[in-house]
Image (tube, grey):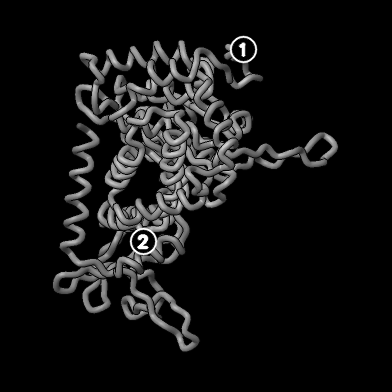
Amino acid sequence: QETYELPGTEQDPGYGQKGTLVEWQERVAAYCAGNHILTFALCTGLSGPLLKLFPNVRSTIINLFGKTSTGKTTALLVAASLWGNPKKYTGQWRNTDNNLESVFELYNDSLCVLDELSQVNAKKLSEIAYMAGNEKGKGRCKADTSSKRRKEWKTSILSSGELTLEDKLREAGLRAKGGQQARFVDIGARVSDEDGVFNVLRGFNSGADLSKHLQEQSAKYYGVAAHEFVKRLVENKFSLLGQDLQTIYEAQIKALCDKFGLSNADGEVQRVGDVFALPAIVGVLAVGYEVFPADLNILESVKFVFNRWLQDRGGKKNVEDEKIVQHVMDFLMQHSARFMELRNGETEENRTTYNLLGYFQKENNKTTYYLILKSFKEEICENFSDRTIRDALKKKGVLITELENNGRERDPRKRINGENPRRFVTIVVKNDYLEEVDSNKAVHQEIEST
């Protein structure tokens, strides 16, 4: 077999081959067996060529996060060795969003590898998370005002860093939205406190030793596996043992649904489930085509990683709604001094409240808040739309509305100090719920400070 290597320049993505498939299997892939993060990274690495066959699966950023020296970069280098020289093939997040459009297009139908998430600008990352999944760059004009060709891609994107998307966006005062988190999937990479990403050490004394071995060997044997996978995929007419890819894919979706009960899960969870099903069938195909070693337990690894994501996310419910409700409750507690108390529709005489947000009224075990519409929109809805917050509060059962004769829902009216009734955003909260919110917040602050 001819061995060749391409120069790693900005114009060239670093594809190249060195060694044989058997050598790569024995010196690199064999040591991934039993190590779920590494096995999943390999399966993700070969998913790019199949993206065009599954329109419901978009280009997705899989981000391996955790403290330094856990083996995250090693997982990226191992995945990069599928396509070329890992050191040349692996890129950095230190890029503008405009340049990343070119990077994504450069790795169309293959794997894009980006290390060190902390290097990217937080505000730009908010846009990149959507852009990557939309698979199209910005529209631009030439000097003569005619339209330039928009960059397009379908690629698997493997990332690593010490931060999650939410952590990074928080630097810029932004919140991660559900649509972003369905396109940017954070996976906690640390499996063992001592050995980082490694479940088993395959005969080495420590995770550091195994990591060093994989980095050294992936620099010697690379680029053959992806070539052989695509070749055998075509030779087998996109099937395995008589089963077409769609059948195999649907079987993996069903397996994930049965395992994790996704049929009644939030839409974001179901979309990410679709994303995880693709590496599952890629791994099954790669083993069936004898590109991956037979002892790589593909399905066990995919389910392990998906379960980790599900646990870190907080389960199958709509996490975005929960965050929105938490945001509103935190706001009410933090700005309690800006509310005036009502007793029988009257405020306390001779009391002035600066920068008034609204009123509150205590009854038995609950508190009703009457928020001034302008303040609600300008302050509470600062990072969300009015409708998004109202929908989340309504689902939680704390937003009070009234129906007009035409069936339209409106904010209820309230008479304050005998004045004409005004409409207020009305939120009713049980007192123990606010105590729970305060307790949860304290716990989160303690964990973050630790």
**N-terminal-most mark, 1 or 2:** 1
Q: Position of residue 296 (x, y in %)?
A: 34, 31
| Image vertical order of residue 205 relative to residue 114, above or below | above
Farthest residue to the right: give it.
144
Residue 7 tag number:
1
* Residue sitting nearer the eye, 5 or 238: 238
Q: Amino acid at mark 1?
A: Pro
Q: Name the residue beneath numbered marker 2.
A: 263
Q: Is residue 442 left or right of residue 197?
A: left
- Residue drawn at point x = 49 percent, y = 30 percent: 121
* Residue sitting nearer the eye, 77 or 332: 77
Residue 73 visible in the displayed image: no
* Residue sitting nearer the eye, 377 or 71: 71
Farthest residue to the bottom: give it.
405
Residue 213 visible in the displayed image: yes
- Residue drawn at point x = 34 percent, y = 25 percent: 32
Q: Amino acid at mark 2?
A: Ser
Q: Position of residue 179 (x, y in %)?
A: 47, 50
Q: Are marks 1 and 2 in contact (CB under 8 Å)?
A: no
Q: Residues within 10 Å of mark 1 (few under 14, many from 20)?
A: few
